[in-house]
Amino acid sequence: MLNIVLFFLVTSLVLYVVLAGADFGAGIVELFSTERSQLLTKKTIYRVMGPVWEANHIWIIILVVVLWVGFPNFYNVLVVYLHIPLTLVLLGITMRGVAFVFRHYDAYKDKSQILYDWMFRISSLITPIFLGMTAGSMLSGRLIITDNYEAYSFSEVFINPWLNGFSILVGLFFASLCTFLTSILLIGETDASNRKIYIRKSKYATITVITMGFVVLCYGFIYEVTFITDFIKSPYTVGFVILSALLIFPLLQSIKHAKKVLSRTLAGLQVILILFAAMSAHFPNLIIASNIEMNLIETAAPSHVINVLGITLIIGGLIILPGLFHLLKSFKMIKVLER
Amino acid sequence: MDNLDAARLQMAFTLIFHIVFACIGMVMPFFMVIAHKKWLKTKDPIYLKLTKSWQKGVAIFFVVGAVSGTALSFELGLLWPEFMKHAGPIIGMPFSLEGAAFFVEAVALGFYLYGWDKIPEKFHWFTGVIVGISGVASGILVVSANGWMNAPSGFDYVNGEFLNINPVQALLNPAWFTQALHMTLAAFTATGFAVAGIHAYQIYKKRQVDLHKKAFKIAITFGAIAAILQPISGDLSAKDIAQRQPVKLAAMEAHYETTKGAPLYIGGIVDEENKKVSYKIEIPKALSFLAFGDFNAEVKGLNDFPEDVLPSVSIVHYAFQIMVGLGTLLMLTGILFFISLKKRTWWQNNTFWLLFTLLAPMGFIALEAGWMVTEVGRQPWIIHNIMKTKDAVTPMPGMVYSFYMYVILYGVLTVAVTWLMTRQIKSLNQSKLA
């Protein structure tokens, strides 16, 4: 049953990264657009994301609940030591969600739109950065896990672990990954005359992601971040990375020829490969602190709890997935893929 | 302000905020689908107008409720890591089911909001019903988790460890039913009266009277029925608390001396230092009867509990008085509404509309006061008789800054949503229909 719980954990992580990632990317693409294409992007993302964006973000709640129920000690380390970046993520999620509905449901479309737009764009950029920073800090090797808080200063325990070069780079990497996903998604959602805009953006985004990924690896290598040195050594990781590197060529081709389905599939696959590479490098030790490595599996709750959680997740999944699939299908997200 | 106080205030503040949005987000869909049903049946365009405008309200409240709920799901761990470490596995079930219900709600809402003229009419309407049902289910599940904090069950507590965890038994803890019933009725009462009050004000101001009367009638019917049923549920809760949390009951009633045939105090000023209540109205033997169904039953007083397990008596007592007082007022006006259906001349009288306008916030004040009774009344425990709140708080210092941040954030959001709602109503009134 532990495997089923892990499956749901990884699935909700992947879905959150891909779906919410594309959602964050929407705001970032809008931020980095000229005024004319900003309006176009705003309209397009409302049409594409509107019906599904709330559902996209629920994956993080599922993720959090599975963590706290199934792996309480692991979750405990995150909420105690990464309190500040997680709070900033929440601030971003709140501003973003609110700005999104405000700009579409305000009864009058007047000057206040400018405020909503900027709130939406900026929070779309900072939220994935802080999310990435949180993930980066888990693996940065700089967390100090201790019971003796007196022995350390506030910044040693609660700030340095996440406010450092490596974590910031991971944050920026994740934000560029989100932009990459959305710009490719938008190619297929706009009419022929505007397609060029997103094809160009997709190319830039692809190049940025590759560059950022490379910078993260180099930084980690130079400063000997354990996670990165292990990342480079692991055969699985290298395999995933080579595969994703090879897929970049067909991806660029399919972007160039505006092939919607293929480029979307390849883009999604890229993200999944990167995630798997990162996870397989050090699984199951997913928290690498300065003094200890924390094994996710070893922090699992008693087997009875895991069993009940597994069953609940299966039942929940059976209720949710058909509805969600139907929703995506009805609003053409999948129809495009079927064509 | 020390860390514990700041964390408690932040939790209280975010919950006070979230509860309003969550309640409206879970109850308003019912108003919306009734109006929608009437549109489908009568094809009266007023109902369509009303449905669409309520739908915007639902969307805005749902999202603010959803994001503040997401924040809360993190805050449980961020503020109370020690609590979540032990309680997480035990009360995970209501939370994971709540996650599923919430997911269903979001999917259904996606269909409903974006499905006009795109999906079959009846299916479209039905997705609105699912929004409401799954919203209520979410609410019940979360309250069940809170019930567990009052009535911990589904584990053995041996030498500070939680063993033999049974998540199903924890979900169905002894407090879940009475609390969930009380809260669901409260949500319907509060939202019903709030929405009805807003429309009553428009009628009072003679704007789009036809439309607002239809809206008023739908909202107040829900609110009034719930308000009339609430005392029954309140009685069940009181008897339950008398059994399980006698110290909370004693604090609610500011009952200091253990007595047989205990009187019920209404109002009064609590003097915690001298353990006295002055200026109260006293009803002989009523407390014994309400708590145990026996006029001569013994009710244990606060003096017979150790000092270190007493909650703040004045806060709990005052909050309880506010809740019961306003609840009674809403029940009476609920009855008044049903009488007004027979005496339609009342609807011509502007005082009638002024009355309901003034009542608009009362349901929510009562609801928040009720939560203060249950939460402050549980202190100093986070898990009743098992773990103290001070032992659960985060070791990170400086929580006061986090508290200030949330006060500013949610303060701004409250102002923004209120402003947005007034714009919705203004635009509705300016529209050509009716």
Image (spheres, grey):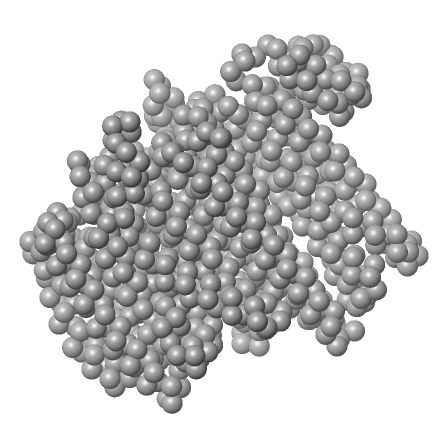
The picture places residue B21, in percent across and down from the top left corner, at: 58, 51
Is residue B45 among the parts visible in the rendering? no
The picture places residue B114, in percent across and down from the top left corner, at: 53, 71
Q: Residue furthest bottom?
A: A193
- In the shown orientation, is residue B408 left or right of residue B204? left
- In the shown orientation, is residue B74 left or right of residue B376? left
Identified at 25% across, 31% down, the residue is A152
The quarter of the picture where the C terminus of chain B appears is bottom right
Above or below, A165 against B173 in this view is: below
Is residue A56 among the parts visible in the rendering? yes
Q: Nearer the viewer, residue A245 or B102?
A: A245
Q: Nearer the viewer, residue A52 or B38?
A: A52
The picture places residue A52, in percent across and down from the top left corner, at: 44, 65
- In the shown orientation, is residue B120 left or right of residue B427? left
Q: Nearer the viewer, residue B171 or B360?
A: B360
Q: Quadrant of residue B81?
A: top left
Identified at 23% across, 57% down, the residue is A169
Identified at 74% across, 46% down, the residue is B225
- In the shown orientation, is residue B184 left or right of residue A289? right
Identified at 68% across, 28% down, the residue is B318
Q: Nearer the viewer, residue B153 or A121?
A: A121
How many marks are shown on the rendered structure? 0
The picture places residue A204, in percent across and down from the top left corner, at: 25, 76
